[in-house]
Image (cartoon, rainbow, N blue to C red):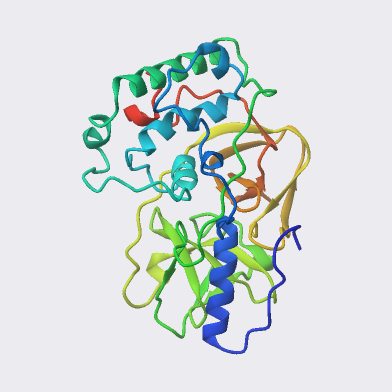
Amino acid sequence: MMKGEMKPMKRTNHSTKALALLLSAVLFLGLLLPALASAESLYVIPDSNTRKLTREELWEYQYDTLLYAFNEIYARHGYKFQTGSRCYMWFTRMPWYVPNENETATDHHATYSQCSKLENENVDLIKAVRKEMRDLGTTNPKGKGMPTPPNQNVDTPRGFTYVNLKAGQKLAVYTAPSAAAYRANNGKASVSTNGAVYALGWDSGWMLMLYEANQAGQYRVGYVNSSEIKGTLPSLPQLQWDRCDCEVLETATLTDDPALTGKALATLSKGTHVTYLTTMYNSGAWDYVETTINGQVARGFVAAGSLSMTTIESEFQTTPGLGDG
C-alpha cells in the first residue's frame, strides 16, 4: 500500500463497491480539498494576471513548470484543454477552473479575447524564457517545481467518470489500446460490468478506464475494445496525448495501479526509452508512458521525476494556448 492511501474496506454489495471505487478514483486524481489550503497554493504564479513578471524571476522555475505557468493565464479565462493532455489533467482539478462553454476544440477566440495586455505580455515573456532554456539545452532542474497538487471535493470528481455499462459482461483489459498489447494478470486481466467502472475517454476505439481488479484491494487502469462492449457505448471525449520521447533517469517501477497498491507491471532500467503521454496526480504525480514488456506495447505509470526529456519539445500542441510561437 502506498503511503498516505486508504486501505480498502470490505464490500458486500454493488453500492458499497461503487462507493469504494469512486473513492479510489477520487484519490487517483487527487481529490478531497484540504480545508486550510490557501488560494495561492492553487496557482503556479498566483498574480501572473495582475503583475508584470520579470525574466529573472521566471528563471527561478523549471522548464516544465513554466509550461503550466503560461497556460494558467489562459486557464483563468476557461481555455478548454484537450482531454488527456497534462494541462487538462492539472487544470481540471483546480476548484477555480471553469471551462469556457463558448469555445470549441479548434476555436479559442473566446478565451484569448478576454486576456488583458498585461496577461499577453506575461505569456510572451514566459515563452521567451522557455525558448532561452531550450537554446541552452537545459530544463533548469534546480528551479522551482510544481506546487503541491490540490485535492478535490469527493462530490465533484473530474477526469475519470462513472460509466453505466450493460451488466453481465466480462471484458478483456489491455494496458494499451490494442489486442496485441501487453495484458496484465498473466494475460488474463479483465473487468466485470457488474461492478463499478470509471472512464477517462476513447483512444482509437478503446476506452481507458479505472476499475477494481479481481484481486482484493487492487485497482487497474487499462483499455477495453469498444467492439467488445454490448449495449450503448458511453459518451466520452477523444483522448489527446502529449507525446514526447523520454529516457528513464534511474531504475523505475511501471505500474497500472497508481491509485492504491503501485504493484509493478515491470521494472524499467536506467536509460530505457519510453514515450511520455501525460501526467496524472493524487498525493503525488505520475507520468503515464508507453513502452514494451516482453516485446509487447504497454502503457503504465512511473513516479514523476523518473524521466528525462531526450527531445525537448518545441511544444506538445500547436494551438496558441499551448504554443511557444
Can residue 207 be seen in this snapshot?
Answer: no
Locate residue 316, reporting x and y percent. 45, 31
Instruction: Return the residue found at the far bottom.
Output: 12
Residue 95, percent from left and from top: 45, 51
Residue 189 as seen in the image, left or right of residue 82: right
Residue 277 can be seen in this image: yes
Quadrant placement of the C terminus: top left
Among the 4 quarters of the image, the one containing residue 109:
top left
- At 68% from the left and 37% from the top, the residue drawn is 305
Q: Nearer the viewer, residue 260 or 68?
A: 68
Residue 279 screen position, x and y as percent: 55, 44
Camera-nearest residue between 247 and 43 = 43
Image quadrant assignment for residue 11:
bottom right
| Residue at (56% x, 30% y) in the render | 65
Residue 213 placement (x, y as % from top left): 63, 72
Rendered image quadrant of residue 259:
bottom right
Q: Quadrant of the N terminus?
A: bottom right
Along the line of sight, which residue is nearer the eye, 300 or 14?
14
Q: From this view, report whether residue 182 is shown above or below residue 290.
A: below
